[in-house]
Image: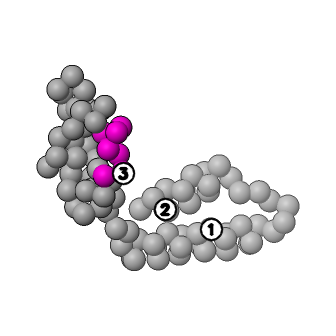
Amino acid sequence: MTQVSAREAKLRFNQLLRQVLSGEEVVITQNQRPVAKLVKEPERDRREVHSAVAGLLRLRKQIAKRGTKANITLNDWKSAVEEGRR
């Protein structure tokens, strides 16, 4: 794990990103205290993506059943967003 000051992180940001992409964690400090950690974003599981798409397709069918006059409700919208986050 690499530890750098905020100033150094600003100057070497591209290099630090390359290190993170290779799997290393980078801790950024301010006044010698850790304030942030750069870590590689986890890969999305294919099943997660398929589940989110399936949820959106279900929502699309629900909207189609209502016809052109009805609008999507706020709760339906929030539900779809939450489904996509899973």
Q: Are marks 3 and 1 in contact (CB under 8 Å)?
A: no
Dot 2: element: helix
Q: Please, which residue is most extreme toward the top here?
A: 31
Specify the color scheme. one colour
Q: Please, which residue is most extreme toward the right here?
A: 69
Q: List x then y, in percent, for residue 42.
A: 31, 62
The residue pinned by badge 3 equals 14
What amino acid is found at the position of numbered circle 1 in the picture? Leu
Magenta segment: 9-15
Q: Are marks 1 and 2 in contact (CB under 8 Å)?
A: yes
Q: Are marks 3 and 2 in contact (CB under 8 Å)?
A: no
Alpha carbon distance from label 3 to label 2: 34 Å
Which dot, 3 or 2, sits closer to the camera? 3
The residue pinned by badge 2 equals 83
The residue pinned by badge 1 equals 59
How many callouts does the rendering have? 3
Q: Looking at the image, which residue is at 31% across and 52% down?
A: 15
Is tag 3's residue or tag 1's residue first in the polypeptide sequence?
A: 3
Predominant SS of the magenta segment: helix
